[in-house]
Amino acid sequence: MLEVIDIHKNFGRKKVLNGVSFTADKGDITCLIGINGVGKTTILNSIMNLTPIKKGEILIDGQPQSPSMYNKIAFIPDASIILPGMTVQEAIDFMKDYYSVWNDKRAKDLIRFFRLKATDKIQDLSKGNQAKINLLVGLSLDVDYILMDEPFSGIDIFTREQIAEVFSSRLVEDRGVLITTHEIADIEHLIDKVVLLDDGAIIKEFYAEEMRENEGMSVVDVMREAFNA
Amino acid sequence: MKKQLQYFIRLVNFEFERMYKFLLGIMIILILSNFAGYIIGPLNYVSKANETMKLESLSTTQYIETYGSFSLETLTRSLWILGPIALGIIGFLFYSIFIWYREWLGKNTFIYRLLMLPTSRMHIYFAKLLIIFVGIFSLLSLQIISLWIGSFIISSLTPPEFFSAMTVSEVVRTGIIFPMILPNTLEVFLGIYSLGLVAISVLFTIILLERSYRIKGFPLGIFYALASIGFIISPNLVSLIAKNNYILFNSELIIIVVIFALIVGLVSLLISRYLLKNKITV
Amino acid sequence: MDLILNKRDPIYLQVIHFLKKEIVAGHLRPGEEIPSRRQLANDLKINPNTVQRAYSEMEAENLIHTEPNRPSKITEDPNVLRQLKSEWVNHAVKDFVSAIRNVDISIEEVTELITTEMNHTKTGG
């Protein structure tokens, strides 16, 4: 389980996170949604210890953060994080060198699935394909948790479809997935748990299917109510 | 432990591959400039000598007495040799800054990947530090080899009557820049390069402070650097304050300065480790 | 799979409903293998956990059977199938009746309309 406990964060004077707490379980697809402002990316960055937090605690299966957690959690940010001069194969080799949990077979499968070529240079790829490289690199790690930041933003519809397919595939099976988005439509039927973030705080945390069953409300219905939109 | 060492070696190798083109560029400039000097230097000297001898009607011996003979050492005072060395020093100073900032540069924020490697972040730090010294020493070795080859070229291009033969080690001992970058005693060599190492560790600290606290970190870094310099040179002030030049022997002074520098290096390392572990931000 | 999901009903119920319809209609035959939960999740673009839940419920109703490490199969028990069919028709009839309750029409006329409609559908309308 990923536990985010009462984390606070300021950018200068501006409070970005103001006591955020939630959990994301293994086997669940948890979706962090905020319709306005920053905060989502900051939360993911804090979980990965890529930005310091002012106050609060982050636990991964009960353990505090440490370098070994990177063999347990993979992060797929909304930015290209492989050197542009590398080819797909070089990126894969780089990962293989450092991660004991690298799954080379899965990487090969993903190249096929995303219809990429191992010899392609990253900098020559379209934005959609660069996003796929990020996914490939993250998903080929045999980790327990995967964090994805806005996997659907600024990407063409066909790539979106391919990425959405990832969520219902063996690739994320039994893992805990935490994704951020401001657009729920693509994945409404795919997610288990929804965490709504507004003004640096969690305003609602619920299971989508329970909400449909007990309240007859769609995720968007709940959002509309919660955000007062 | 073995695995960690492996990661470190891979990181060093990775940094080397990224530095390769930069290093090669400086090396090519050094070779081209040096070799141009080895050829143009003697030719210029001889033509100038002939001209002066004609004008002032001097004999060869008289000319050499007045203007000096030509040797490899003469050439090391020229821009052909000094230029590339200066370029190397400035280049590596710049590279020490660039080696960090490029991870954040542009849309490809490789810092994410580096910070998410399942290994101590100090490995990244040490790999960067080490690779700068690998680069510097590669250039230095190339310079020595170049001088050695140059000594043959010069001796064959300079008429024997004007030429005074010097070995490379003699040249290195007497030039203006070489006693600084290649001291001939081990103690001084280690002293100078440990000072260099400390200087780069302070520079890294400034960079990491800026990367951790952004604009606020920069003055903090400058303050740290000034404090470090003050601390390192403070033993020199002892005799000033005591108004007694004999309170410390020179050799003692140097040892104290080096020890103080090493303390600064250690502190820089600890600060950097703390920043990389707890404060750095993508 | 021709299933368009709505956003407000629980997805697992929509999946169960869909599979029952396929069984009643004879598109899924007794003893036939049904898609793995992974496959169905992929086809419908839904969460595999949700399909798992739907399958579990259907197993509890004896509509499907799963042997260890084998794909799930539609039951071959005629009683279960008969009951499903009659439940389905009963449900449809109830809906139909409640929809026309207030319409002034005789049972004979309704029967005739149903007969015509059913023949029409069968001959490929």
Image: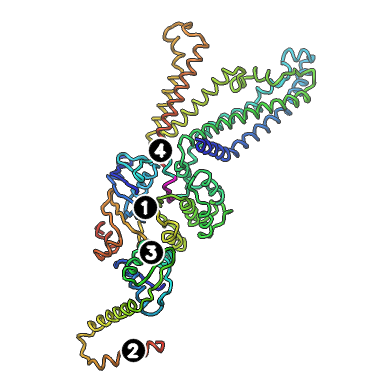
Chain for mark 3?
C
Q: Secondary structure at mark 4?
A: loop
Element type where label 1 sits in the image = loop
Position of C36 relative to B128 (above/below): below
Q: Which residue is at a point 34% across and 52% down the rendered structure image?
A: A25
Amino acid at the residue labelled 3: Ile
Q: How far is mark 2 from mark 1, CA to CA? A: 52 Å
The residue tagged 1 is A26
- Marks 4 and 2, how far apart in space? 73 Å
Residues at circles 3 and 2 in contact by the CB criterion of under 8 Å: no
Label 4 in the same subunit as label 1: no
**Distance between mark 3 and mark 4 Cα atoms:** 39 Å
Q: Marks 3/2: CA distance?
A: 35 Å
Could you say which disc has been placed on residue C46 in the image? Answer: 3
Label 2: how many residues lie within 10 Å, few (<14), some (14-19) or many (20+)?
few
Q: Nearer the viewer, residue C41 or B101?
A: C41
Q: Which mark is residue A42?
A: none
Badge 3: residue crowd in 10 Å (few <14, some 14–19, many ≥20)? many
Residue at 54% from the left image edge and 55% from the top image edge: A108
Q: CA distance from mark 4 to mark 1?
A: 28 Å
The residue shown at (34%, 65%) is C56
